[in-house]
Amino acid sequence: ALFGGITGDVSGTWTLANSPYVVTGDITLQEDQSLTIEPGVDVRFYGNYQFRVLGDLTAVGTEQDSIYFRNHSATSSFNERWRGIRVQNYNDKDIVLSYVSLTEAGYDGLLYVTDLSALSSMTITQSRFDNIRGENGDFSGTCFNMINTASSEDQNLIQISDCIFTGGSEGFNTGSYYGTETNRVFFTNCLFP
């Protein structure tokens, strides 16, 4: 395990041998960097911190060894929960998530994607987005937000397949999709609340 906690810029490879990765401050994958997360890695947020993604992210688990993003310990306070993964100003980058489990984030939800350019692609398969609960224990918030997304003539697709979105008031929310190409975002065999 990696003791002392992670904060600030991240990149490279997160290995199963060093798992769990305990996050003790906001972390950022910078635009000119990449991060690969190995199967079975457990990423635990010790407080109200966010994972901001500007670079290439590859988190590919297996059916037997999923990758987990979650709170370090159970908390009923919305303000103490981790703040999810925020993919922001994403230009000419790729994100791949497979056999990934994201649970109980506050604020913007588990995965918040904003300003995704036409040159970027996103593939999410066999993953779970679970249990966003409000202060009173009721489900609230959105599992997956995608805002300000550009259409793509280059076939840089956004493909989400075989995923489960549970809890929350909405499984998926989108706003401000712009451009002329309409065949960019595909959901296949996904379960929503």
Image (cartoon, grey):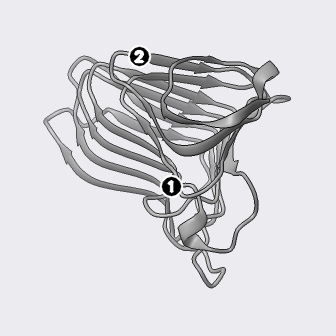
Point 34% across, 16% down: residue: 32
Mark 1: secondary structure? loop
Q: Picture quarter containing residue 63?
A: top right
Could you tell me how many numbered marks the image carries? 2
Image quarter of the C terminus: bottom right
Name the spot of residue 11 as percent of width and height, x first.
51, 20
Q: Residue furthest left?
A: 180
**From this viewpoint, is residue 9 visible?**
yes
Q: Residue furthest front?
A: 4
- 21 versus 76 height, above or below: above
How far apart are the two marked residues, 2 and 1, measured between alpha carbons? Answer: 22 Å
Q: In the orientation shown, which residue stands out farthest toward the bottom?
A: 136
Please state, as top left, top right, bottom left or bottom right, where the N terminus lies in the image: top right
- In the image, is residue 73 above or below residue 2? below
Q: Nearer the viewer, residue 154 or 88?
A: 88
Q: Quick one: 102 or 128, which is closer to the camera?
A: 102
Q: Which residue is mark 2?
A: 33
Residue 111: give x, y in percent of width and height.
48, 47
Res. 168 visible in picture: no
Amino acid type indicated by mark 2: Gln
At x 14%, y 35%, the residue is 180
Q: Nearer the viewer, residue 24 or 62?
A: 24
Mark 2 crowdedness (10 Å alpha carbons): few <14, some 14-19, many ≥20: some
Checking the image for residue 83, the label placed there is 1
Q: Residue furthest right?
A: 64
Q: State which tag comes first along the sequence, 2 or 1.
A: 2
Mark identifier at residue 145: none
